[in-house]
Amino acid sequence: MKAYQITEIGKQAEFTDVAQRPVGAGEVLIRVQAAGICASDLHLQSPDYVVGPLQKLFWKFPLTLGHEIAGEVVELGEGVRGWEVGDQIVGGNGVGCVSCWQCNHQRSLCQHRPPVFPGLGYDGGLAPYVVLPQGFLVDRGDLSAQASAPLPDAGATAYRAVRHARDVLTPGETVVVIGAGGVGHFAIEILKATTNAKVIAVDVRQEGLDLAARVGADACVMSGPDSAAEILDLAGGRCAAVIDCAGVVPSVALARAVIAPGGEIVVVGLAGGHVLVGDPDLPPGVRARFSFGSHRRDIYEVIKLAQAGLLAAEITTFDFDDVPRMYGELAAGNLVGRGVALMPASGA
Ligand SMILES: [Zn+2]
Ligand SMILES: [Zn+2]
């Protein structure tokens, strides 16, 4: 079958012809219906990417990309319980050592090694079929494949970031979401669905601000030299939380400039921005957190929100054959919302 693979980290991905591996004990064969594409896949293909020692140890190459998977169960491996052929699923969350406290609580912060995911460690969903451990599956019920493919990664990552900020978002408070892209637009929807906070969206692109307004942001601010003053004006001088989905140096600087005393800064993006503990320029009592990915319960809960009609992925769909071109569009900043590849219905 045709798969979109990298042969090693730092190399450009390409279509290759691969054999479908057999389904092992505790594993499930999935016919992929749709697969989201993510900026982290681009990082992996960059020659500047720094390969961690544990990635060298645990990752298998060549590696089929695609860690946002929506599909259908077509075969059960030995010992699989609770799943049936025909179940509609999303595949997500990482698996670590499976024995530490974090892993035993289905959290993706394994104490012993970075979790591996389908598409980030072993073969992912940019292929007609993928084999996943049963622990990767989450039932999506009657949600469509294309609408639910981004939920296990972009959706759940946003959900977890909002969870971190929720304590300070009592009614009437203001939250700023920086970066209204694949993750940020979900954060806005989740904030509107689960808090009473006023949501101010910030982006460097007009398309991002248009998207933010479409999904419910109360106010939108174009990133620029005056954006901190504009945000504080809109917020009545007080921003209880900032969720920074860009994570670059200027966006984190903006978060520091607008956060209120006792506020919560949640940095989601991995792009060089950081907050120093004890920075005398920070207001007192500010908490800052690096939110990485999500836990299994975040995926489950974000799917429940989507099933309740409180969250809908904003997506740009394209044929599987167009994956290389769409990664190019993602790299150029031209994709609106999340890019989702649709697989041929036959699964061929
Ligand atoms: Zn991702
Ligand atoms: Zn572990």
Image (cartoon, helix red, strand yellow):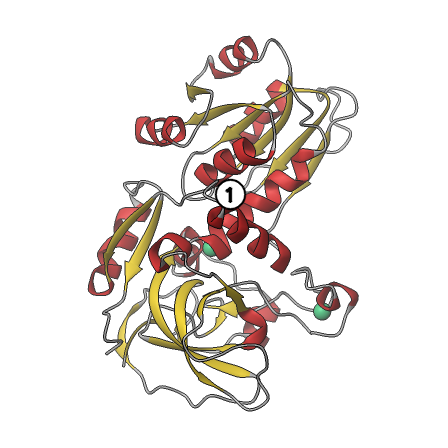
Asked whether the viewer can see residue 275, the reply is no
Q: Position of residue 16 (x, y in %)?
A: 27, 77
Question: In percent of the image, x 65 and y 61: which residue is there?
Answer: 108
The correct choice, above or below, for 331 with respect to 185 in the image is below
Q: Categorize mark 1 by other alpha carbons within 10 Å: few (<14), some (14-19), many (20+).
A: few
Q: Is residue 134 left or right of residue 29?
A: right
In the structure shown, which secondary structural element does the residue marked by tag 1 occupy?
loop
Q: Is residue 166 left or right of residue 48?
A: right
The correct choice, above or below, for 233 with respect to 205 in the image is above
Question: In percent of the image, x 69 and y 74: which residue is there?
Answer: 97
Asked whether the viewer can see residue 254, the reply is yes
The correct choice, above or below, for 76 with respect to 271 in the image is below
Instruction: Give the quadrant of the N terminus.
Output: bottom left
Q: Position of residue 198 (x, y in %)?
A: 55, 21
Q: Quadrant of residue 22?
A: bottom left
Q: Is residue 187 left or right of residue 263?
A: left
Instruction: Give the quadrant of the C terminus.
Output: bottom left
- Camera-side residue of 62 and 73: 73
Instruction: State yes or no: Cβ of the residue under disc 1 lies below 8 Å from any atom of ligand 1.
Output: no
- Camera-side residue of 184 and 149: 149
The correct choice, above or below, for 286 with respect to 33 in the image is above
Q: Position of residue 209 (x, y in %)?
A: 37, 27
Q: Position of residue 220 (x, y in %)?
A: 42, 20
Q: Quadrant of residue 275?
A: top right
Residue that mark 1 sits on = 271
